[in-house]
Image (cartoon, rainbow, N blue to C red):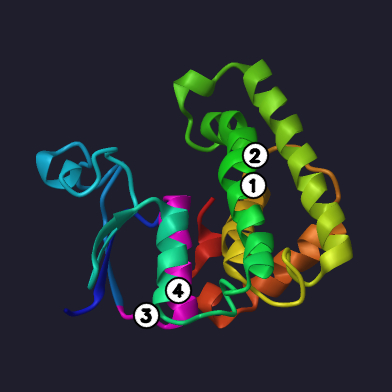
Amino acid sequence: MGALRVLGRQSSINVRKVLWTCEEIGIDYVQEDWGTGFASTSTPEFLALNPNGLVPVIDSDDGILWESNTICRYLASKNGRDDLLPPSPWRRALVERWMDWQATELNSAWRGAFQGLVRKDLAYSDPSVIADSARNWNRKMEILENTLATTAPFVAGDEFTLADILIGLSVNRWFHTPIERPSLPAVTAYFERLSERPSFRRGGYDMFP
């Protein structure tokens, strides 16, 4: 088979997780625009790939796969990148803890503020919803600040892992969203370190919220 197919628009943070992982590993891939503003994910063609109608989806040597965090784990394991996803149960758990935290706690915190202020979603236009979300989002970022002040330079310890791809993109979104933010020097320094990685710069991920 040829290059890995990544289906999903680059404006999706979940698609960017997969693209950054590909860049970090050095995987030959082709990204195809699907989702809002592009090819519809509600067509029978796409739903046959992912019945949830969501991006990203990959078409790999092994078959079709969806769910962004699962895709990132698969790609790291498939390519023997134990640095990104350690084989040791304990070290792997330290990485996956932050991956799961990003997908649950952090995602749910930012939804109201990001959807209301950046996506202009009318379902999140209530100022009180936006304000509550912004406060909760900042509280989650303070958790990250306290962690990085202890574990710097990366969230799971001394080495860059898959967790930093997910968390790094989330930090980028926090900086891009027009909310009042506390000063978090460890988070700022962390994002500056990530921004210097060649894989991040090639993708230009700081151009997207």
Name the residue beneath numbered marker 4. Answer: 77
Name the residue beneath numbered marker 1. Answer: 101
Mark in front: 1 vs 4: 4
Earlier residue among tags 3 and 2: 3
Question: Which residue is the extreme one toward the left?
Answer: 44
Earlier residue among tags 2 and 4: 4
Q: Look at 78% across and 61% down and name the residue there.
A: 188
Range shown magenta: 12-28
Separation of residues labelled 3 and 4 (CA atoms):
13 Å
Point out residue 169 in the picture as x, y percentages from the top left corner: 58, 57
Secondary element at image label 4: helix
Crowding at dot 4, Cα within 10 Å, few <14 / some 14-19 / many 20+, comes out as some
Give the quadrant of the N terminus. Answer: bottom left
Q: Look at 42% across and 83% down and name the residue there.
A: 26
Per the image, is 21 magenta? yes
Name the residue beneath numbered marker 3. Answer: 27
Q: Can residue 172 be seen in this view?
A: no
The three-letter amino acid code for the residue at tag 3 is: Ile
Q: Is residue 8 above or below residue 74?
A: above
The three-letter amino acid code for the residue at tag 4 is: Ser
Name the residue beneath numbered marker 2. Answer: 105
